[in-house]
Amino acid sequence: MLEAISKMFDSTFPASFINFSFLPKYASYFVDGVLNTLALSIVAVLLAVIPALLLALMRLSKNRFIHGLSGAYIAVFRSTPLMVQLAIIYFGIFYIIQVPRVYIGFIRLDMFIPFVVSLALNSSAYVAEIFRAGILAVDSGQTEAARSLGLSQWQAMKLVVLPQAVKNVLPALANEVVTMVKESSVCSAYGMGELMFAAKNVSGTTLISVGPFVFIALIYFCINFPASKAIEAIERRMRRGDKR
């Protein structure tokens, strides 16, 4: 038993947790992986915001068809695996819509666009519920006061309710970026060159079975833990501002 545990920390053993001998030769793989992971995550959440806001407003509509349509979209994307959605969009929609195989910096468009669209469509279902909760959290008296001043229902929503709702949901949106950083790893199954793909390639090439994955786990931690703490600090600051 002790021998087995010692091998886990023997830097010369292929399955060692601390065997990072691949780094000098393959460091560039992980740099590209970090860049692709961050680009996928940030762009996907930004693209998700507008459709999510629209879906949230549709969910609050009194029109049964509009309400049901948005509910169906959210139910489908929240109730099916992200990997299945990626497969349908990548092999289906983007087989018909051909994206040119060109690079813009480190981004390969024919891989990046299908996956960022897939992630954005999936994220919009979750962000829509975040927006809906943020809108419902605004006191109904705000709408009544706006209507009493002569504003229409839409003007009250746009000028009074939505600005307050956006402030309410900003920390949750930031958390969605953190979540997306982790979820983007499923894109590696279809050849997207993010962190998980880099680790699998290096592991297969060098036969170092654990080290590359421990290394990307550390990278994910170094990205997400400080981001989570920064979000918590922003939330505390916003709560202090509300008390004043």
Image: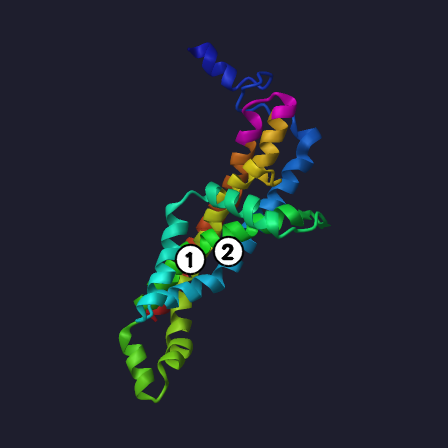
Measured as percent of width and height from the top left, residue 17 is found at 52, 24
The reply to whether dot 1 and dot 2 touch (C-beta < 8 Å) is yes
At label 1, which amino acid type do we have? Val
Would you place residue 210 above or below residue 146 in this image?
Answer: above
Q: Which structural element holds mark 2? A: helix
Residue at image position (65%, 42%) is: 32
| Outermost residue, front side | 96
Question: Residue at 38% of width from left, 68% of height from top?
Answer: 57
Where residue 126 sits, quadrant-wise, is bottom left
Q: Amino acid at mark 2?
A: Val
- Residue 24 in the image, given as x and y percentages of width and height: 69, 30
**Residue 106 magenta:** no
Q: Position of residue 28 (x, y in %)?
A: 69, 37
In front here: 210 or 49? 49
Identify which residue, 241 or 80, lies in the foreground: 80
Residues shaded magenta: 204-214
Magenta region includes residue 210: yes
Toward the viewer: 16 or 157?
157
| Dot 2 alpha-carbon crowd within 10 angstroms: few under 14, some 14 to 19, many 20 or more | many
Q: Which mark is residue 45?
A: 2
Q: Is residue 136 above or below residue 95?
A: below
Q: Which residue is mark 1?
A: 127
